[in-house]
Amino acid sequence: MRVQQLLEHHGIAVNPFAEEDAQSDPVFKERCRDAAYHPVWDKVYGDPAEPSTSIVFGEKGAGKTAMRMQMTGRIALYNSQSHSGRLFVIQYDDFNPFLDHFADRLSVRKQREPARVLAEWMLWDHMDAILSLGVTSLVDRLLGVTQPGGSTANQINETKLKTLDRQQKRDLLLLAACYDNSTGESALARWKRLRRKLGFFTLLNGWELWLGFAVTIAVVATILYQREWSWLSTVWPYLVAVAGWVPWLARCVKWQLAAHRIVKNVRVLKPSTGLLRRILMRFPPRELDNQPLPENQRTDDRYELLTKFQGVLRSLGCDGVIVLVDRVDEPHLITGSVERMRALVWPLLDNKFLKQPGFGLKMLLPAELVAYMEKEDRDFYQRARLDKQNMIPSLEWSGESLYDLANARVKSCGSHADVTTGRSPKLRDLVDDSISDQRLIDSFRSLRVPRHLFKFLYRVLVAHCHAHTDENPVWKVGPETFEATLAVYRRDQDAADRGLQVG
């Protein structure tokens, strides 16, 4: 007997439990993303009109990634319904590129030990990474890139570009110079396209270069007009020509040094010093007077640049920024090590950073970090102020909520024919009546998280179909198969948990 045969008999078009990871689960993404939410959803998601920070701890398979995807979907819906006050979403869930660039800046000795690499990671490195993701996503959309980076929730109304004043245009171009991390075209060509898109004209810029050319041409013209070829054997024509280039050379040196400092201290990216210097020299000198640049290893400049980024977004119709932090246990430098996760995550836990106006972090973190947090000293709690961060210490699922979740998935997988008749399949349709609802709920409670629930239900369906033939099908899972599969699965689950604890 085939599993698909069993499902089709009950009006279920696709297997609701075939996938275990929300990131690659078509049933979740296409059918039931908005069908079932965790009971703490409201506290985590909050009010989109007032972005806030939430910190959630959950074990593997508890649904952290699913919750992140649900938040992205709800924000996209909110943005589509709101003409003002939209949210700009930054998905900070792929740390590998940033960690790779960061590690390359360190000595070879430190690169050999991931723990020593992560010990160097600071809050300003997180801020640089977040600014890079946000600025690149924004520039992609302003330039009409075919496949823009970032969340699909980020829809920018280009007609509002006219509302940007010259200072905001300069701010966006300055942010793009430092943080635009697109690889689709050269940094200079992309920056020029953005400058033209914004209408940021710099006709009087580069007078030092024209002065150098003018003085050189004047010296050559004077020698040709006077026909004093003997002057070429003296020093003064060369000194005058060089003197004309001194302002331009001084400006080159100034911005070459500034570009070098930026490249050195923005450790999560790998910009080119030469290209960055050429871009910075295209700004009129007065436009960059007293402007913050990430030239030092400190947060002060990054806070100012983040404020500028929020100001540009606000003029473009996005009143808030939401940063979704997830999958901190997956980077290759971490490989599940709780100590390394702690080194990566702890710098983010700074109340000044987490409580900025119009800015919210949704941090979806592994449950193993809770034990480390409980061991921290008073200074850590004073800096993090976790009492203000909407913290969920455990993303737990009750048996009843898991039953509702399984039922929602089965219902969402109903075939078109069943939808037209108004009848939706239920989980109970697949299970023999001798197995009570309470027994199902108690069994699901012992599985703890959705991932284990889906794995178990998939095994149950396969075991049931293996026990019957196509000629003599049985359309409901019996109690013997259910209990035997549950016992084997729980034994395997306990063995896997012990293995993780030992590791």
Image (cartoon, rainbow, N blue to C red):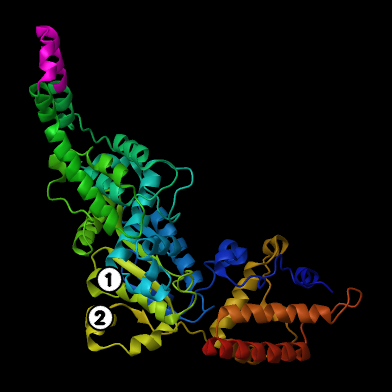
Residue assigned mark 2: 385
The answer to whether residue 79 of the structure is visible from this angle is yes
The furthest residue to the right: 471
Estimate how packed mark 1 is, as few (under 14), some (14 to 19) or many (20 or more) residues with alpha carbons within 10 Å.
many
Residue assigned mark 1: 354
Circle nearer the N terminus (1, 2): 1
Query: CA separation, marks 1 and 2?
Result: 9 Å
Left or right placement of residue 428 versus residue 501 in this view: right
Asked if 184 appears above or below 248 in the picture, the reply is below
The answer to whether residue 164 of the structure is visible from this angle is no
Return the residue nearer the eye: 71 or 175: 175
Asked if 141 appears above or below 29 in the picture, the reply is above
Return the residue nearer the eye: 21 or 179: 179
Disc 2 residue type (three-letter): Arg
The residue located at (25%, 84%) in the rendering is: 381
Q: Quadrant of residue 393?
A: bottom left
Q: Secondary structure at mark 2?
A: loop
Picture coordinates of residue 441, whole percent (x, y): 61, 88
Pointers 1 and 2 in contact (C-beta within 8 Å): yes
Quarter of the picture containing the N terminus is bottom right
Picture coordinates of residue 345, whole percent (x, y): 36, 74
Q: Secondary structure at mark 1?
A: helix
